[in-house]
Image (cartoon, rainbow, N blue to C red):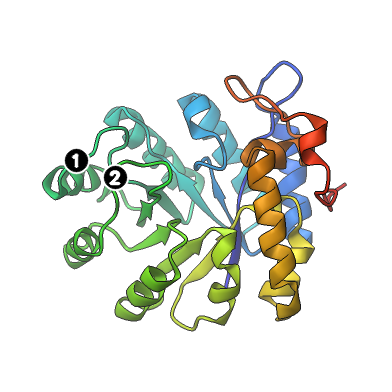
Amino acid sequence: MPFYTSLLTPFDSRARVDLARLRAHVLWLSTQGVDGFLVTGTTGELPYLSDREREAVHRTVLDAARGKVVFACTWDPNPATTAYLTDAAREQGAGAVVVPPPAWYRVDDATSRAWFESVAGKGIPVLALHDPHHVSTPMTPKLYAALRAAGTVTGMVDAGADVYRLERMANEDPGVIWAKGDAVLPMAAKSTQLAGFVSVIANVWPSFCMRLFRSGEHQLEVALVERLNRVERAGGIRALKALTRMGCRAPLIEPADDLLMGLPPAEGP
């Protein structure tokens, strides 16, 4: 099963996107066994990136990935910007675009269907994104089934961390559901119906993740839970960026050093 990493977006000391650092990070992750990448999603701080920055991130990752598949999150509150980024991702060679339902306001299924229909038909596969932690409108099984039946989406990235939902939906639509979120890594490693797995903490500890995912070292599951809890207490994405020295852009700020105590150092260079 493919193992992808949902990439962090590095910033330099002046809060500019550090494309050279991003390229080096992608090259390093590739040497660690990562099969592909998801870019400019919630892990990549998409609310704090302009459309031009996101396009540059997509281009940089696709070039550095050297043939590995890249999924580009092209969502934007402005439908015209979403269309622009989707067209650009297709032209740059992305394997698919990842799009959640309309964010901020909770909407009904008819509104969500119209939203996805506006993204579909651009010559690139569309993966719906279910992320109840960041998006008000969930990708319900009923809505997903309707979009799949209409050919509007080709699959889904599910970041809900609900193993029962993942198992049920993967069994009903095998080979096109991606599990995102390290809390379900052990479950995903054993699944025969999921399309693949997308990790966040692999930005920091790829070999640790691979030992669980590829080598089946299940004795590490307790250590995984402990790391995830410590990362959450230390600031989540902000803690991962501090460990990898990738910088934050306002309004996010790096957590204090004392909050990072107890977390293993990053594996990277």
- Is disc 1 in contact with disc 2, using a CB cutoff of under 8 Å? yes
* Residue type at tag 1: Val
Distance, label 1 to label 2, CA atoms, is 8 Å
Residue 180 spot, x, y in % from top left: 51, 59
* Residue in the foreground of this view, choosing between 131 and 64: 131
Q: How would you rate the neighbour count of disc 1 (Cα within 10 Å): few for under 14, some for 14-19, many for 20 or more?
A: some
Q: Which residue does the image show at 32% across and 52% down from the upper left? A: 123
Rendered position, 148 above or below 128: below
Q: Nearer the viewer, mark 1 or mark 2?
A: 1
Taking 141 as reference, is 63 left or right?
right
* Residue in the foreground of this view, choosing between 216 and 117: 216
Picture quarter containing residue 171?
bottom left
Q: How would you rate the neighbour count of disc 2 (Cα within 10 Å): few for under 14, some for 14-19, many for 20 or more?
A: many
Q: Secondary structure at mark 2?
A: loop
* Residue in the foreground of this view, choosing between 221 and 179: 221
Taking 143 as reference, is 196 left or right?
right
Please say whether residue 49 is visible from this viewpoint: no
Picture quarter containing residue 205?
bottom right
Taking 230 as reference, is 7 left or right?
left
- Residue behind mark 1: 107
Residue 57 spot, x, y in % from top left: 58, 36
Residue 21 spot, x, y in % from top left: 76, 36
* Residue in the foreground of this view, choosing between 238 and 61: 238
- Residue behind mark 2: 101
Residue 176 spot, x, y in % from top left: 39, 70
| Sequence-wise first label, 1 or 2 | 2
Rendered position, 215 above or below 205: below
Q: Which residue does the image show at 52% across and 25% down from the upper left? A: 48
Q: Which residue does the image show at 52% across and 40% down from the upper left? A: 40
Q: Secondary structure at mark 1?
A: loop
Please say whether residue 115 is visible from this viewpoint: yes
* Residue type at tag 2: Pro
